[in-house]
Image (cartoon, helix red, strand yellow):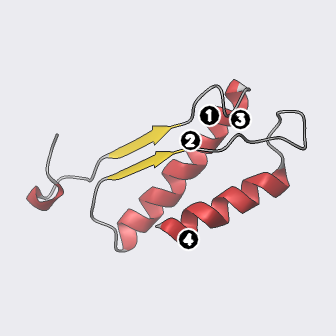
Amino acid sequence: MASSDQGTRPDLGIAVAKKLAKRAVDRNQLKRMIRELVRGAQAINLNSDVVVKLKKPIGRETRGKLRSKEKEILRTQIAGLI
């Protein structure tokens, strides 16, 4: 693993389990959203490695589908962590 103090880009790890996000479309969309947010933060001021792991299932009220409302909630939660 490359160290971020040597001028290389920090590493990013994303774990979205199939148990927690049933549809592949939703898992991939979450990963893209997380990458976008973390890379934006890394460009500004974040210079360390990041690991993001989904812990709670998504889509409970929408029969397993990720909807716009949930996406915005997740986006604000992730942005708050960074």
Q: Nearer the viewer, residue 46 or 78?
A: 78
Residue 50 lies, in percent from the top left, at 36, 53
Label 3, label 4: how far apart the Cα atoms are: 21 Å
Tell me which label, 2 or 3, sits earlier in the chain: 3
Q: Which residue is mark 1?
A: 28
Tell me which label, 3 or 4, sits earlier in the chain: 3
Label 3, label 1: how far apart the Cα atoms are: 5 Å
Q: Which residue is mark 3?
A: 26
The image shows residue 45, relative to residue 69, as above or below, that is below
Q: Which residue is mark 4?
A: 80
The count of marks equals 4
Residue 40 lies, in percent from the top left, at 46, 64
Amino acid carrying label 4: it is Gly
Label 1, label 2: how far apart the Cα atoms are: 5 Å
Residue displayed at 36% across by 46% down: 12
Q: Can you name the residue that lies furthest to the bottom here?
A: 45
Residue displayed at 60% across by 50% down: 33
- Disc 3 + disc 4, Cβ < 8 Å: no
The image shows residue 73, relative to residue 67, as above or below, that is below
Q: Can you name the residue that lies furthest to the right here?
A: 62
Crowd tier of the residue under label 2, counting other residues whose Cα lies within 10 Å: few below 14, some 14–19, many 20 or above: some
